[in-house]
Image (cartoon, helix red, strand yellow):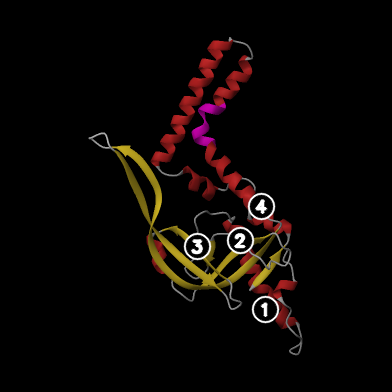
């Protein structure tokens, strides 16, 4: 099932400013925090040196720039998440898609390579690998896509045949060519799977419940002989 969404609904489901889940995603691990902290420290030092070289003029501006730089470690996850949200919101059209889980499997993927020097002074490349869940979803129309995410224990509840819901993004009004998809929601185990939580979760679940009620209510009001409408021809607000 694929139901086009209005632009207003699209912007409600993909917020412009980072949500809590998106902030946590970009907060990262301890090494990510330490890297941001180091950037903040270096930026403050550079601003101090520049201030010493060019004198004490524009003290208010320098203080503001120093304050912003010193808090880079805190506000940068908001910036990067919001930037990624803007990339999704650049698509002109979106649709609510509902299908099923076709396959679930785990892979050991290379996520990062680091260069270091061993005790003999030789350059060594260290591969950082991560176990990731791969979720293939699809529907009767032949549409299929695979989503990845870091493997977690709760993923044991996922099984083929379960209902899967997500947002699709396109630059074509009829959604005949899908350019991007969101993270996927599995109502039965109540789980989200995806590399990045681009959706406002509560708003998406509410939209899903409204869409699932709408066809049932319409069928009770309509005559048994009436022909059901094509989901592609109605746009949900």
- Span of residues in magenta: 68-75
Q: Which residue is mark 3?
A: 147
Q: Residues within 10 Å of mark 4 (few under 14, many from 20)?
A: some
Q: Nearer the viewer, residue 106 or 236?
A: 106
Q: Earlier in the sequence, mark 1 or mark 2?
A: 2
Residue 142 location (% of width, % of height) = 58, 76
What number is the disc on residue 216? 1
What number is the disc on residue 204? 2
Q: Earlier in the sequence, mark 3 or mark 4?
A: 4
Q: Main secondary structure of the magenta part?
A: helix
What number is the disc on residue 89? 4
Q: Quadrant of the C terminus?
A: bottom right
- C-alpha separation, residue under disc 4 versus residue under disc 1: 31 Å
4 inside magenta stretch: no
Residue 48 location (% of width, % of height) = 52, 17
Regarding mark 1 in the picture, which secondary structure is present there? helix
For this orientation, the residue located farthest to the top is: 55
Q: 72 left or right of 60?
A: left
Q: Residues within 10 Å of mark 2 (few under 14, many from 20)?
A: many
The image quarter containing residue 214 is: bottom right
- C-alpha separation, residue under disc 2 versus residue under disc 3: 18 Å
Q: Earlier in the sequence, mark 4 or mark 2?
A: 4
Q: 81 left or right of 3?
A: left
Mark 1 or 3: in front is 3
Mark 4 or 2: in front is 4
């Amino acid at each position: 099932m694929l139901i086009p969404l209005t632009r207003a609904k699209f912007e409600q489901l993909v917020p412009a400013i980072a949500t809590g889940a998106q902030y946590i995603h970009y907060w990262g691990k301890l090494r990510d925090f330490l890297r941001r902290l180091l950037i903040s420290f270096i930026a403050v030092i550079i601003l101090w040196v520049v201030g010493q070289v060019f004198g004490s003029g524009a003290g208010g501006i320098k203080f503001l720039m120093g304050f912003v730089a010193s808090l880079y470690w805190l506000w940068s996850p908001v910036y990067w998440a919001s930037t990624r949200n803007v990339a999704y919101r650049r698509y002109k059209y979106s649709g609510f898609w509902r299908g099923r889980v076709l396959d679930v499997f785990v892979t050991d993927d290379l996520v990062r390579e680091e260069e270091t020097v061993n005790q003999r002074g030789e350059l060594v490349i260290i591969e950082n690998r991560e176990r990731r869940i791969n979720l293939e979803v699809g529907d009767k129309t032949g549409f299929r896509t695979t989503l990845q995410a870091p493997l977690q224990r709760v993923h044991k509840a996922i099984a083929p045949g379960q209902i899967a819901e997500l947002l699709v993004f396109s630059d074509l009004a009829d959604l005949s060519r899908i350019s991007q998809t969101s993270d996927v929601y599995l109502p039965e185990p109540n789980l989200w799977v995806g590399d990045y939580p681009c959706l406002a979760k509560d708003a998406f679940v509410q939209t899903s419940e409204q869409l699932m009620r709408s066809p049932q209510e319409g069928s009770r009001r309509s005559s048994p002989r009436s022909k059901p409408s094509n989901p592609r021809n109605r746009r949900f607000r």
